[in-house]
Amino acid sequence: MPVQISSYLKKVLIADAVVSGAAGVAMMAGSTFLPNLLGLPAELLLWAGAALVPFVAVLALMIRARSVPAGIVVAIIAVNIAWVVASLFVAFGPAFASTLFGKVFVVAQAATVALFAELQIIGLRRTRAMV
């Protein structure tokens, strides 16, 4: 079922696109000098940043649309939640030896992404309540 992109949801999607785009560029550009500071592999930073490019492209298409299938909004929320879970694994799991600054960086961006997911859930609920 298509849902209208409300003004509220549009603002949240714009914020997510801007922050995700900036983070993607920063991770890709910083993949040469951030590994020592964060204690994370350059490849992880490069590919995590690159993964955000198609995500931002989908957000941009959604922002331009008047309505989208509700499943796409749910998929964006699911991707954001998966990013949070993966980020927490990177920060605290056994696979990486991130520095304290690396843990703070990863947790801070995970918290930001979790906030976007929550705001998108609120936006989807408000949109459905209007129908």
Image: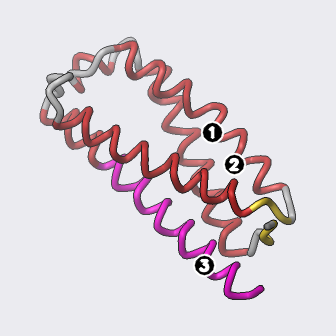
Q: What element carries label 2?
A: helix
1 and 2 marks in contact (CB < 8 Å):
yes
Task: Residue 15: give x, y in percent of width and height.
Answer: 59, 57
The residues tagged by marks 1 and 2 sit, at their Cα atoms, a distance apart of 6 Å
Neighbour tally class for label 3: few under 14, some 14-19, many 20 plus, Cα within 10 Å? few
Of mark 1 and mark 3, the one earlier in the sequence is 1
Badge 2: residue crowd in 10 Å (few <14, some 14–19, many ≥20): many
Earlier residue among tags 3 and 2:
2
Span colored in magenta = 108-131
The image shows residue 7, relative to residue 72, as above or below, that is below
Q: Quadrant of residue 62?
A: bottom right
Q: In this rendering, would 120 be left or right of 65?
A: left
Which label number is shown at residue 55?
1
Residue name at image x 69 percent, y 54 percent = 72
For residue 59, which numbered disc appears in the image? 2
Neighbor class of circle 1 (other Cα within 10 Å; few <14, some 14-19, many 20+) is some
The residue to which callout 3 is attached is 125
Q: Residue at x 39, y 12 (%)?
A: 32
Report the front residue among 102 and 74. Answer: 74
